[in-house]
Image (cartoon, coloured by chain):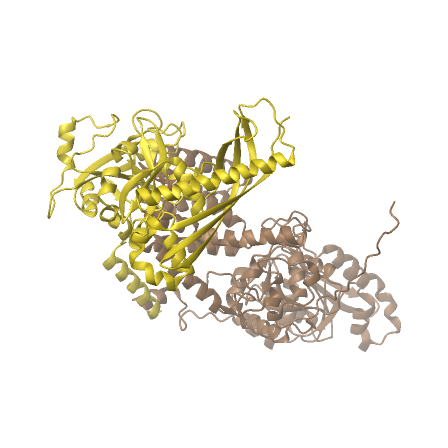
Chain colours: A yellow, B brown
Amino acid sequence: MMKKCIFVLIYILLISSVGCWDRKDIETRGFVLGIAIDDYPPIPTGGATTQNESKPEEEKKFELMQTHVGRPTYAMTVQIPIIKKATFRSSSFEGTGTGGPATHEITQVGNSFFSMTREISSRLELTPYYEHLQALVVSEDVARKGLHEVLDFFIRDHEMRRRTRIFVSKGEAKKVLDVVPRIEDYSAILLAKLPLNSTVNSRLIQQTDLGLAIENIHKRNDFILPYVEATKDEIKSLGAAICKDGKMVGWISPIEVEYIKHIRGLYEGGVLNIKDPYHEKAIVTLEIASSKRKITPICEGDKPKFKIDLRIRGSISEYANLKYHDLLDENELTVLEDAFASKLKEECQTVINSIQERYGADVFHFNTILKTRKPDYWEQINKQWHDIFPTVEVDVSAQVKIAHVGNIR
Amino acid sequence: MLKRIKSIFTHRKNENRYENQNIEELKKFKLGNDLDDNISQLLRFMGNCFDIKTRKLTLSKQNVEVAVVYIDNLADSNIVLEHIIKPLTINSSDAESNANNNLFEHIKNSVISAGTAEETESYDDIVLAVMSGNTFVCIEGYSKGIIINSKGYSGRSVTEPIMEPSVKGPKEGFVELLKDNLSIIRRRIRDPNLSLEKHIVGRRTKGEVVIAYMRGIVNPELVNEIRKRIQAVDIDDHVTTAKLLHFIVDHPKSIFPQVQTTERPDKVVSALLSGQIGIIIEGSPTVLITPVTLPMLLQSADDYHENTYIVSLIRFSRYVCLIISALFPSIYIAITSFHPGILPTTLALSIAGARAGVPFPAFLEAVAMEVTLEILEEAGKRLPKVIGQTVSIVGGLVIGQSAVQAKIVSPIMVIVIAFTAIASFTIPDYSLNLASRILRIPFMILATTLGAFGISIGVLYILGYLCSLENLGMSYMEPITPYRLRDWKDTIIRAPYSTFGKRPEFLAPEDSQQQIITKIKKAKNKGGP
């Protein structure tokens, strides 16, 4: 009896002295869904959808914060859904549905992201909560200045998640968050769901995790990040930002992204068009179901060589600009397969060469392959890799198998 | 301080100790030779009540006086008249040839035509017999009498079990009358090894308690232990299932039921056949089964009337429901107030949206809903069935709906509590259901103070407690722990009957073979139609 009493007392003591340390009711948290990082100055103006009544000049007064040291260099915008308008749409509950934007966007200017997030609490009754952060949009200017400096807080803090999607935006990043999507409620969630379409569109990059980007930065790998562009009410993922040494160095086109994905073995599905070798005008479409890559490093002399073998399986899904064609002839199929293969081979080669020339950025992660397959050799050339990469020879070969020719009747 | 509080409620040993002198006195008295003396003594003992009937007869041939004593409403008047009084008056003429010495034997053996007739000479036997509805016959000149079984009171007829209905199983349930219950069990086990031991419990009420077990199957030590515990029960009052099980379990203060109470004869029969002991109490429509373990309490009668895969799924979901019933509100509290990060974003937003405008924290909300639920259930139990429906409509629909609309509680909380309540109703054993309900409150407190960490502390404590709980030398979590894989055939899943060869090992049955499985090769139909 006495023992039990002591246990109960200890429990009460523990609680009363520690308090309910993390207790916070769910509705008092401000779920930050998206963050946009822009350069400062100037403060981003964003779209015209600012819901605040006050004039821009007056608004900007709050955006500046007093810093401990240094000058403000970044502007961070957080997207917080207005919960009352957001969810549980049922006719019997008032205050839901129409009118006004569904999110509240707060811009804060400063030089430390952590103090900026804390500063936001002085302007919002809800406590910002980052565990549901969906998307991080970094403007191109910031990315060119260096991603490393920006992203540290977003991986170091315990509320941050590795799976947050990261994007580089053309122009102001706030403009991307300002978009009011037509179907999805919040632009941040739209952004987070966008890469999931990479199974049907090979121009989208599915590996966009914040954790992965940070990992690459720390490993001194080069990588690509999805590049997004926004209009007033639409967001489009368009090509990729190519990053070297944790800095954006250039932009590559969507088609180049496709071939990079082929070479890296990340291809999940997409299309490939060629001109029909028999018919002048016809464009044949191959729906690629699977793309398998086999890469072999050949380490002779002071420069490694790579042999890439692509195996594509797909089906013919369209024959455009041609009246009628049944494709039942086996020989014709073989010719088609070869045509696709040579197209793929050529393009891959071109993309590799062009990236080697333009940026010298190893976005194909050849260094990882060397490191895992030929560790001894890697030790030798480790230091000079950035000099070696632009001159590395790559030999691409491709094999295409057409599994189905599709319905024609 | 606590000791002082405790002493208010506990029995004070030296004060007010009631000595039942009447009954102690009775044991000393024996019947005398004088009939009138005997009868007046007996009536004095029984307080000269109006319903005690004494009929004096004179056997005409022998000119001997005979008295018949019975209680009017307890004894079957048909038996008393047709089989005791009538033969005594008419057939006594046949006794001519008998010597006077054998008159007692003659009456006992040849005259009285009732089912049983026992000799006795002590008053306590006679009083108990008459009080339980038997008839006492006393003959002039003999210092002994005859007790004739004439119990004739009627009870409720056998009906469907109310608390444990079954879809395909038998629709017969126990009733209050001991003889009916015994006959229900006897009818199902036509085995001479079925042992029924009668014990009298209750200093004043003298209720009958029957220990039922299968000789040759049950572990005899268990029977001895139970017998010892029942014999040691010394209470004044009417013995009920709840009271009795308080005396026969190891840890009566535990909230977990260590004895199974059931209204279903088929449950009792299968328990007896697997080596458990049944305790049947007069006046109680529930039968106790002991020893029992937690997995047994989650078995339902319907589990044995369906296909093994279907039953296994249902059984598994029942275990999940037990966990949900105890933990779901606390998990909800922990997630919404500590760890909203583990929810999918859209769900987190929708919960936050539902909770927006609710004035109370999730814990108070949950406690309020829990209390409301208990009130509704209690009200539903007390009221007759016709009004009970009104309560459920007013309580469930009107209060629930308007409380949500008035933003006193969030709709999600209503869902959580309702789901928890429904889950708790799937637990077949009502006492276990109550235990899981009681557990909710401490878990909610833990969740609101320490979050998921608190819940895991609580779960670990409960698991440790359950594993260390013992009754009759048997762990409460048998056969899950201690680990006996062979006995898992009837726990989380119900394996096919072909695996039910051995009885549960942990009950230590004398005869462990339950059934012998012989595979019959099916003749292949080669010809075809």
The residue sitting at 58% across, 69% down in the picture is B484
B293 above or below A238? below
Given residues B370 and B426, the one toward you in this image is B426
Q: Is residue A406 left or right of residue A25?
A: right
Of B365 and A337, which appears nearest the observer? Answer: A337
Q: Is residue B419 left or right of residue B85?
A: left
Question: Residue B167 or A269: which is nearer the viewer?
Answer: A269
In-image side of B417 versus B185 (left or right): left
Quarter in which the N terminus of chain B is drawn: bottom left
Measuring from the top left, give residue B228's x and y in whole percent: 57, 74
Q: How many marks?
A: 0
Horizontal and vertical percent for residue B377? Answer: 47, 45
Q: A76 above or below B239?
A: above
Residue A31 in view of the camera: no
- Above or below, A232 relative to B201: above
Residue at 30% across, 28% down? A101
Q: Nearer the viewer, residue A301 or B382?
A: A301
**Residue A118 image offset from top left, x and y in percent:** 20, 45
Name the image quarter holding the C terminus of chain B: top right
Toward the top, the furthest residue is A323
Report whether residue A138 is seen.
Answer: yes
**Residue B196 in picture, x, y percent from top left:** 68, 67
